[in-house]
Amino acid sequence: MSVAPPRRRALTVTANERLGAYTLLKVADPAGPAPDPGQFTMLAAVERWGGGEDERPYLPRAFSLARFRHGEAHYLLEDVGPGTRRLCELQAGERVWALGPLGRGFVPPHDDRRALLVGGGVGIAPLAILQDALEGALARAPSTRKRTRPPATVLLGFRDRDRAAGASLFRGATVASDDGSVGHAGLVTELLAAELERDAHAVVYACGPAPMLEAVRSLCELLRTPAQLALEAGMACGFGACYGCVVPNRAGGYLRVCVDGPVVDAAELTRVEDLP
Amino acid sequence: MSVAPPRRRALTVTANERLGAYTLLKVADPAGPAPDPGQFTMLAAVERWGGGEDERPYLPRAFSLARFRHGEAHYLLEDVGPGTRRLCELQAGERVWALGPLGRGFVPPHDDRRALLVGGGVGIAPLAILQDALEGALARAPSTRKRTRPPATVLLGFRDRDRAAGASLFRGATVASDDGSVGHAGLVTELLAAELERDAHAVVYACGPAPMLEAVRSLCELLRTPAQLALEAGMACGFGACYGCVVPNRAGGYLRVCVDGPVVDAAELTRVEDLP
Amino acid sequence: MTVSFCGLELAHRVINGSGTFDAIAARRVFGAELDEDFPFAAFVSKTITLQPRVGNPPPRLWEAAGGLVNSIGLPNKGLRRYLAEDLPELAALPAPLITNVMGSSAEEIVELVEACDERPEIAAVELNVSCPNVKTGLDIGSDPALLEEVVRTVRPRTGKPLIVKLTPNTADVAACGLAAQAGGADAVSLINTLRALALAPRTAAEGPRHWLGGGTGGLSGPAIRGVALAQVAAVAERVQIPVVGMGGVQNAGHAREMLDVGATLVAVGTESFRDPAAGAKIGRDLVRDRP
Amino acid sequence: MTVSFCGLELAHRVINGSGTFDAIAARRVFGAELDEDFPFAAFVSKTITLQPRVGNPPPRLWEAAGGLVNSIGLPNKGLRRYLAEDLPELAALPAPLITNVMGSSAEEIVELVEACDERPEIAAVELNVSCPNVKTGLDIGSDPALLEEVVRTVRPRTGKPLIVKLTPNTADVAACGLAAQAGGADAVSLINTLRALALAPRTAAEGPRHWLGGGTGGLSGPAIRGVALAQVAAVAERVQIPVVGMGGVQNAGHAREMLDVGATLVAVGTESFRDPAAGAKIGRDLVRDRP
Ligand SMILES: Cc1cc2nc3c(=O)[nH]c(=O)nc-3n(C[C@H](O)[C@H](O)[C@H](O)COP(=O)(O)OP(=O)(O)OC[C@H]3O[C@@H](n4cnc5c(N)ncnc54)[C@H](O)[C@@H]3O)c2cc1C
Ligand SMILES: Cc1cc2nc3c(=O)[nH]c(=O)nc-3n(C[C@H](O)[C@H](O)[C@H](O)COP(=O)(O)OP(=O)(O)OC[C@H]3O[C@@H](n4cnc5c(N)ncnc54)[C@H](O)[C@@H]3O)c2cc1C
Ligand SMILES: Cc1cc2nc3c(=O)[nH]c(=O)nc-3n(C[C@H](O)[C@H](O)[C@H](O)COP(=O)(O)O)c2cc1C
Ligand SMILES: Cc1cc2nc3c(=O)[nH]c(=O)nc-3n(C[C@H](O)[C@H](O)[C@H](O)COP(=O)(O)O)c2cc1C
Ligand code: FES
Ligand code: FES
């Protein structure tokens, strides 16, 4: 787990690129620690964080690292409220407060299982950096290992064509869309079921809306396929201070998504609740 | 007194020009009523009014109309806090909420006294539109009157050269600066005293910091020269609703600057208090 | 379709918070157009006291995070001049008039309420027992037993609807609401401003000092909306009489939440400072959203 | 130069608000660098109860205008596991430990305080009689007579400094401060969060419902700063014991205002969520501004 500096730092936006319905925000972070895939950052605009809908935002917002290269972090943002709206309008040269990298990331397969990456909507973000890492590891691995572990398979689901533009973050992905405008007309979990039917010797890495994660979880439980789920929850701090970001665990208690996750082993949960 | 529509309206910024230390913000207001010189507008940015210093601004801010021509209003702004800072950064195409024109403006001389306009700092703003009006009236007046009433004399005081750039709003002005970098080295009230000594048959129109206004007031009281002072006070509403913008009057009570002013006859006050 | 409130038939559910709209001043500023789309279904006057008050010395305003701290000090002409000078003009408004009064003793309040009772221009009386800037109002309002006694004394003196405006600076606002009801109030309104302080920005030369000329003040606006919602919900759950909910309402969504937790009417205060048409817009949007 | 507070010598005047910083979690997230510039001059634990608590169901957070409404529900391991598991790690922090406890009866509180008294790792005890999320804490804290009695009962059970954290949801917080002092408290701290409510964003399909899993919550952050300043001033004016001021403090200017109205220490809560180094920065800036 990558350790974060214990203070927020002011970083400079280097690019704001449109990716269909999403915004790809690139931020220079030359001194920042390299994140583990699945880790996230708490972001807030340095200027004018506030004064939007209902006089918000006030607290920083959590975003998965979608890529980290040459001291530049990429975030894939969907505008869903005052915080994401403000971040989506930041242009090169403007600054963001960043705290991170935070949380527990994905654990790479430790045997010869193939990696099945399943993403839904803006939840595809952490899978991009995971693909980078898995391919990088593969490239660096001794040639014997290379032969036994196949490259990651990427399955992505989107609501529509505009969102499916997010797939361009990946090198090779099979896409499903709710409205049938791109790829398979239907749910990404249908693609997953087909893949697992073909070859269940896999580890599933999933991130996306709660109902999708729950479908992944129950399918993998059924097939006894190990699955790692990147969860979301409303957060105030991102570093375990507020106890606000909880989801129920199997033991009848709660996990803090920011420090016990965001990536959790599917076995830790009874189900993925669709919290409001 | 010009009557305002009873609602704030979203107007578009047409230009943001630098005038030394000040910003001249031009706003298209094609349907807005023509203001009287000395009236003001409550302004707030439509987007991101908030999230600055101490999570402010929240309420709109009062600004004198500095000019109004062909459905375009000009405001001269000095960045002194989170509200003015936000407004100063607005660019052409961005929008402001505007409520106004509000308050009582200057009353033109009703005899053949000459008009002496005395401004300090950003307080010069309402004098520019007053000069426009006086000259316009002069131009339109029957030729007999033209002969008897001389054009307005404009005296302006600034802290330094950067602020003195505001003088360019006027057609002909005598300038004083605290640091001596432009014009008379000293106070604008020294210029006023000299002018009144030369010819006291005048009406004084003054706007600026409280100590300047108080100097004008006491000088005019001494010389029995009528004076109209444009006051400032912290405001929440600008239309008499909050009772927040008061200054003490001669009767031992308070005036609401927004509805009883901002322009008041100097005779209404015992002194101009330098409120914090 | 009108809304019934204590026997009044109102055009919609939005009124103003006392002391946050001066209809007489507004008419001068905005002219006749104000009446054409008058922002409130009923107009609540500023707090009127027996004797005239000039109010607190300035500064009276402090801008807070998402809110306003005010220390106005209840300036008003006093009962006599209010009735003589303002009532005729207020009677001409296109909305019924609720007169808000405050007294420093039960006797004073009785005198105020009786004077209002005589005047047909006044549709209802609101009792301010909650103003945090003036000692008296606070003391009566935060002690349920005392509050009930005062309301019981005042109640028989008027046949007009009697609204009691509760103080939010109390441990158990529902108990205060119940006390007002037990004393005979026809409705309660809340919340008034939360007691708050502002210090002057520090300069090197000066020591610390209060910003507000009146010392402490009261916080209003979006900053208090969650607190207001909790208090309105707590009171509405317990009382049977109608509740006027206010505190930080900026739009119809916020007003709807007040209704959702049990309010019958919603009052708009500080938001009117940002837009005098806020009340009209909220009233309209509420009807549009759910006719 | 250190700051004396109830016999403790602290490096500066800034500590954390209980429940707003988990030093154990933070050490895992931030590693050894956290200790090098530990944000607080003393570390206050989350509220510890006799029995373990899982806390309230999510959602637990609602962002308000310039603030946060939380309904966390005091999750904690319970006294036994806190002492066994957390204390060793907390004892290794580069700042003295203040343990915050809450009980639902005087007997429970006595048990908690006695257990703390035995442990040398604990420098002081803070009594939470002010948590608005759990009935018990509120009731004791808002009634001065009851509060004094409880403090008086608990007081003899420990030789360690006893801080009473007052509830802000009361009519007269100064009376509560005086009651704590009369009962034998060594210091008081305030303000805790203001009782507040949040409703879920309305969808066409659904009726109104609470957003927070725990029902009502408590408001913190800049939105309450003016209220906090007023309450800290009111208490500090009346009591002789030291006061820990908190509520909405975001920077050294705000902290200085708490000191200006009479606080000895300042606690930072919600601002740490925006920046874990907020406490360190404020502590440093305070010293720099006036050494
Ligand atoms: C670990 C993690 C990683 C994430 N990664 C990404 C990512 O890579 N890209 C991305 O786009 N998003 C990501 N998110 C989600 C992102 O953090 C949220 O979309 C963002 O916080 C929304 O903020 P907002 O102000 O735009 O919207 P909000 O208005 O805060 O709305 C977001 C949701 O919060 C709820 N809500 C509404 N009002 C409030 C309120 N006042 N208080 C509390 N909740 C409210 C509603 O359910 C609403 O749908 C991630 C979240 C987590 C926890
Ligand atoms: C009738 C009128 C006409 C005006 N015309 C002009 C004009 O043409 N051009 C122009 O530049 N200005 C004009 N002003 C002044 C302008 O309104 C103020 O400069 C502006 O409101 C400052 O807002 P701010 O947020 O930038 O600064 P603020 O931070 O609000 O600071 C302004 C002053 O308010 C005080 N203050 C600080 N903090 C607070 C707080 N939290 N709450 C309340 N007060 C605080 C301090 O004394 C500070 O110096 C006019 C004012 C009036 C009343
Ligand atoms: C400037 C100002 C003056 C007020 N004057 C009074 C008053 O005279 N009488 C009264 O009962 N309430 C008064 N109030 C309280 C409001 O009526 C209302 O209860 C409070 O502001 C909360 O609503 P809001 O957040 O919508 O403003 C005043 C509030 C403000 C901001
Ligand atoms: C998420 C959260 C959890 C809190 N938990 C506790 C707690 O366990 N015990 C307690 O006494 N106060 C608790 N508080 C109150 C804070 O210690 C503090 O009194 C309050 O938040 C005001 O300070 P602030 O505005 O700086 O946050 C909590 C506050 C927050 C925001
Ligand atoms: S976000 Fe604060 S504990 Fe997880
Ligand atoms: S600014 Fe509100 S009454 Fe003048």
Image (cartoon, coloured by chain):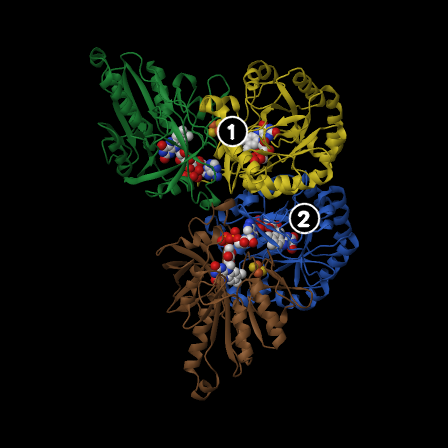
Chain colours: A brown, B green, C yellow, D blue
Label at residue D96: none
User: Callout 2: residue from which chain?
Assistant: D
Quadrant in the picture for residue C104: top right
Which residue is at the far bottom?
A144
Type of the residue with mark 1: Cys
Residues C287 and D50: in front is C287
Q: Residue furthest right?
A: D107
Dot 2: element = loop
Where residue D222 sits: x, y (%)?
Answer: 54, 46
Q: From what the image shows, is residue A173 above or below residue A149?
A: above
Residue lying at 52% horizontally and 76% vertically, measured from the top left: A195
- The answer as to whether callout 1 falls within 8 Å of ligand 6 is yes
Location of residue A148 in the rendering, given as x and y in whole percent from the top left corner: 48, 86
From the top left corner, tell me how far across and down residue A193 is, in percent. Answer: 55, 73
Tag 1, which chain? B
Relative to B44, say whether B149 is above or below. above
Gap in Å between the C-alphas at discs 1 and 2?
A: 33 Å
- B245 left or right of D214 in image: left
In the figure, D56 relative to C108: above or below? below
Looking at the image, which is closer to me, C56 or D39?
C56
Locate residue C115: give its quadrant: top right
Q: Which mark is residue B242?
A: 1
Name the element at disc 1. loop
**Pointers 1 and 2 in contact (C-beta within 8 Å):** no
Nearer to the camera, D258 or B42:
B42
Give the residue displayed 59% in from the left and 74% down from the top.
A220
Residue A124 screen position, x and y as percent: 48, 66
The disc label shown at residue D132, or none: 2
